[in-house]
Image (tube, helix red, strand yellow):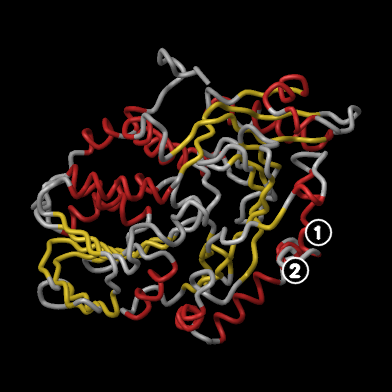
Amino acid sequence: MSGEYDLVIVGGGISGASLLYTVAKFTDVESVALVEKEAEIAQINSHHTNNSQTLHFGDIETNYTLEKAEEVKEGAELLAGYLENHDPEREMHSKRSKMVLGVGDEEVASLEERYHEEGFGDLYPKLRPIEREEIAELEPKVVEGRDPEKDLLALQTPDGYVVDYGATAQSFVEQAKAETGVDVYTGTEVTDITETTRGYTLTTDEGPFDCDVAVVAAGSHSLQIAKEMGYGEDKVLLPVAGSFFLADDGPLNGKVYTLQMKKLPFAAVHGDADVHDGSITRFGPTAKLVPALERGRLNTVSDFLDVFGLNVASFLSYANILSDRILLPYVLRNLVYDVPEVGRRSFLPEVQKVVPTMELEDIERAKGYGGVRPQIVDTKNKSLDMGEAKIVGDDIIFNITPSPGASTCLKNAMRDTHTLIDFFDDDYEFDEDAFRADTIGEFPRLDDADGDEE
């Protein structure tokens, strides 16, 4: 197996698949290949058991600034519009109420300020503050058993998209494969990328691929490949494994978040019904540091060490980050959650912040759930880089996408497509208007006939 292409994309998760869809459907690039090491598309972090299934709009994520929320909002609406357009039977997603819950005077005041004074009420027309009685109508178990003397307030919206990102990635690929000049290779691992006079040669276990331009969208492995090619020397990864606890009999109807610490890059504990089975509620995620790039795969420990580098700057960066008085207790507490029985008892109070009446026997650790999210570390500043990382080289792009990378996959794809057109010296064109019509143009607004139907 071998081939010559204008563009080769490495990685068949939601990031690589969304770029393949965007380039194949809305540009006139003549030949594109996607190369994925797994036997099927989206089997690692994009698989529906390995992430929180949340489409992040920035409306109830209380660690987002208004500026970050504005950035994330368009990306989420692009993907939501795609799902509305291409998944009318809701096989890839479901749409439910979601809210962020404030309990007690301090949290209620924080939400009121966020909504009225910080501008979130203006930015999200469907977001609204609701009090105890209406919270109970939407989520009875959130109010049941809670101290009636404590103030309750939630910021609630009907735009609670719960997404099977694996199925969505597969949908992107199927859309792309319907176009001419598109090839998809699974079970094909890239072992080396070498710059050539034409562009790049990708060495794989199934033969070489030659291309003018390359994009590496291989999650944590993107930085590993970048470093092998001399890029990203000032970055390392802090891999965080997320896990969940499950409760049967569906105590929640939708998604309920708690307030989040602003310094933490990880999602606040929340509860939500599974995308494919509303009778199962997932609580989490936990966040455990792991020395591997993929969960449960010991062979990726050496990959982590390649990225880490075992140098002074990396160790000092880790020490600086993990000595933080907020982050360190959080990391240690999350280690306990993995201990059999002890972990379940320790996590129960977090669950009870969402559903007060939950008991120990109501929850169990979800086996086989959770993936690894690579948090990017800047070794120059010895700090965490909150959000996604992109390295743009000479006719090559490396995408490393922790949360909310899946939520903003189409926005990233749109930006990368513009960059690719520049790489090709404008020999090709990107029809962004058609792209937007197929995606964000289908997102229901409040002034649409059915925009506030849920």
Marks 2/1: CA–CA distance: 9 Å
Q: Residues within 10 Å of mark 1 (few under 14, many from 20)?
A: some
Query: Going 75% across and 22% down the picture, which residue do you hit?
Result: 131
Q: Is residue 339 above or below residue 59?
A: below
Percent coordinates x, y for residue 318 in the rendering: 62, 75
Residue 92 as seen in the image, left or right of residue 118: left
Query: Going 33% across and 60% down the picture, which residue do you hit?
Result: 40
The reply to whether discs 2 and 1 touch (Cβ–Cβ < 8 Å) is yes
Percent coordinates x, y for residue 261 in the rendering: 70, 50
Q: Secondary structure at mark 1?
A: helix
Which of the image's four quarters has the N terminus?
bottom left
Identified by mark 2, the residue type is Val
Which residue bears the numbered disc 1? 346
Identified by mark 1, the residue type is Ser
Percent coordinates x, y for residue 449 in the rendering: 41, 12
Residue 8 as seen in the image, left or right of residue 340: left
Query: Going 34% across and 81% down the picture, which residue do you hit?
Result: 228
Which disc is residue 339 wearing? 2
Which disc is residue 394 wearing? none
Residue 383 as seen in the image, left or right of residue 283: left
Percent coordinates x, y for residue 202 in the rendering: 21, 75
Front residue of 284 and 202: 284
Front residue of 86 and 340: 340
Residue 308 as seen in the image, left or right of residue 168: right
Q: Secondary structure at mark 2?
A: loop
Q: Residues within 10 Å of mark 2 (few under 14, many from 20)?
A: few
Query: Which of disc 1 and disc 2 is earlier in sequence?
Result: 2
Q: Is residue 117 above or below residue 41?
A: above
Q: Is residue 142 above or below residue 345?
A: above
